[in-house]
Image (cartoon, helix red, strand yellow):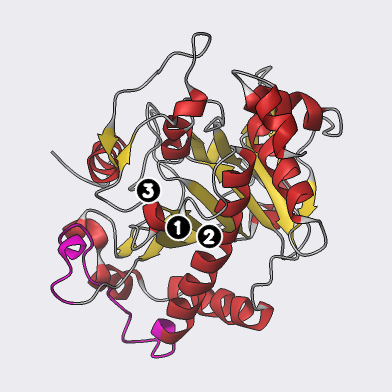
Amino acid sequence: MTRAATTARQPDPIEFRRNRVSQSVPGQVPVLSLANMARADFAAAFGGSFQRFGFAMVKDHGMDQALIDRGWALARRFFALPEEVKRRYDARYNGGQRGYTAFGVEIAKGASENDLKEFWHVGRDLPEGDPLARSMPPNVWPEELPEFRETFSRLYAEFDRVGADLLSAIALYLGLEERWFDKPVENGNSILRLLHYPPVSPQAPGIRAGAHEDINLITLLLGAEEGGLELKDRDGNWLPVVPPPGALAINVGDMLQRLTNHRLPSTSHRVVNPPPERRGYSRYSMPFFLHLRPDFLIDALPQCVDADHPRRDPPITAHDYLTERLREIGLIKG
């Protein structure tokens, strides 16, 4: 789409893009190629998938597969450690932001049962004296796995890089300057989570992770091809999200929903139990929760507010919003 076409449709250029792209989107999340599509075409399709589903799937993202494979191997080794060893790195002392969170601690907002998972968090390391470091505790690393730090520091940087590229496509879709998001996410409080869903019994009721929306700007997820991830569509149906091996599943978080005045929806999603014959196997995944800078003020973009779409949320800093939501899901007490 040309910029002239964008400006000609007022006051709602995003609605015009949605109508144009939605004709090519079937009743499932499309798989897009980051490397093999023209930039404008990718931005239109990626943004259209976000607006239709709150999700997109992206292959050819350029992340180092050998590095990813080392990450999977190390995650399996860590979660196989004895419980008393893992609990030496308990994240409850830093608001759940760094280190280990034990099985059954996290609960989806509004849920009655805790999730059937354990996880490890890697965050951003900032130089000593950086004012933003007050809201980002230093990383902790398991002494039992000396290569853990180097591998996941590199993976964190890879997710950061690809995430910035995807945000630039969203900026184009929204009619912003292509690198508009660079400053808002610079030194953002992004989290790389290593997730382990242990085996459950063949008779296990319920689901592994309750229906929820993510807090952050966008989430980049590796490992969804293992099955179980589902999103809730506009009609209330649960749709499976199963990207090709190695591809990313990407979803809108609450911060981007607020920033776009709910034009890009933060869609409810969950992880269901597998078929009974597969419940004896662990499930691993690796989401990267891409966050804004803690001091960034989240307020609706002007082009997302008009007479038909009044502002829906009051302004709030990224740090205050994150703190509010972490309390709701049990990672911060009080």
Left-right relation of 284 to 313: right
Residue placed under numbered mark 2 in the picture: 164
Most extreme residue toward the top is 307
Q: Do the residues under discs 1 and 2 have CB atoms within 8 angstroms?
A: yes
Residue placed under numbered mark 3 in the picture: 104
| Amino acid type shown at disc 1 | Asp
Mark 2 surroundings within 10 Å by alpha-carbon count, few (fewer than 14), some (14 through 19), many (20 or more) = some
Q: Is 300 in front, or is 208?
A: 300
User: Would you say the magenta stretch is mainly helix, strand or loop?
Assistant: loop
Residue 238 visible in the snapshot: yes
The x and y percentages for residue 310 are 44, 13
The x and y percentages for residue 295 are 24, 49
Q: Residue at x 33, y 80 (%)?
A: 142
The x and y percentages for residue 36 are 82, 62
Q: Do the residues under discs 2 and 3 have CB atoms within 8 angstroms?
A: no
Looking at the image, is mark 2 or mark 3 earlier in the sequence?
3
On screen, 194 above or below 27?
A: below
Q: Quick one: quadrant of the N terminus?
A: top right
